[in-house]
Image (cartoon, helix red, strand yellow):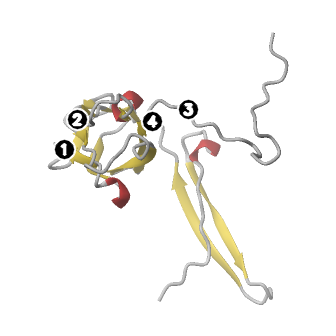
Amino acid sequence: QAIPVAVITYTASKAILPQHWSGKILVKTKTGMYKISIPYQAIVLQGALVHDATETQFYTGSGDPLSNVTQGITLVNTFNFTLVIHSLSLPADSLPYFTIQNLSEPVMLRPGAAAQEMALTFHPSENSTEQSLHFTTQLQVATNASTFYIPIVLYNGRLKVVYHSPLLHPQIEFGTLG
């Protein structure tokens, strides 16, 4: 049985050039008696799965009773190869509020092409209040190249003031204003 001993994160923004990256991860024990060398390889792909951020933002502060809202999601392939979208998914805690629509089979996106078939429906529950519907979650897009995460934002348009230290500074200090 495998036991996770570490988490390794690859930051693609550090590898700007489109090339193969490889190396070895050296694992040492606390006592230094054992050393394990794990080879790795990564390929940097130039491009992105682009989306319009306004398509995944939902305003909940209208004061009217909240109702279902469906917004189309457009995804554009800027890679130089065909991208296949296998699935869209949401975290479990977002499922009471959102439904993904119109994605029945894998969608093929040629370079520069856009997919507009998908939609996201926001459906507040009867117990939802304007204050409770103020959070951010992510839409996971699984493709043949990578897994992409698109932020989904529910907002009510109200600012929340957070004091640095409410015990020491019960008011906001803006300094000298002219």
Q: Is residue 142 above or below residue 151?
A: below
The CA span between labels 1 and 4 is 26 Å
Residue at which label 1 appears = 101
Q: Residues within 10 Å of mark 2 (few under 14, many from 20)?
A: some
Q: Residue 156: x, y in percent?
A: 43, 34
Q: Residue 103 in the image: x percent, y percent? A: 18, 46
Q: Position of residue 130 (x, y in %)?
A: 39, 40
Q: CA distance from mark 2 to mark 3?
A: 25 Å
On screen, residue 86 versus residue 131, left or right, reads: left
**Pointer 1 and pointer 2: residues touching (CB < 8 Å)?**
yes
Residue corresponding to mark 4: 47
- Residue at the top extreme, as displayed: 178
Label 2, label 4: how many angstroms apart (C-alpha)? 28 Å
Between discs 2 and 4, the one toward the N terminus: 4
For marks 2 and 3, give the one nearer the viewer. Answer: 3
- The amino acid at mark 2 is Thr
The tag earlier along the polypeptide, 3 or 1, is: 1
The residue labelled by disc 3 is: 159
Identify residue for label 2: 70
Judged by depth in the image, the label closer to the viewer, 2 or 4, is 2
State the residue at coordinates (64%, 44%).
14
Q: CA distance from mark 3 to mark 1?
A: 32 Å
Label 4 near label 2: C-beta < 8 Å? no
SS of the residue at dot 2? Answer: strand
Mark 3 secondary-structure assignment: loop
The residues bearing labels 4 and 3 have C-alpha atoms spaced at a distance of 36 Å
Q: Is residue 30 above or below residue 55?
A: below
Q: Is label 1 in a helix, a strand or a loop? A: strand
Q: Amino acid at mark 3?
A: Leu
- Mark 4: few/some/many CA within 10 Å (<14, 14-19, 20+): few
Nearest the eye: 125 or 7: 125
Dot 1 or dot 4: first in sequence order is: 4
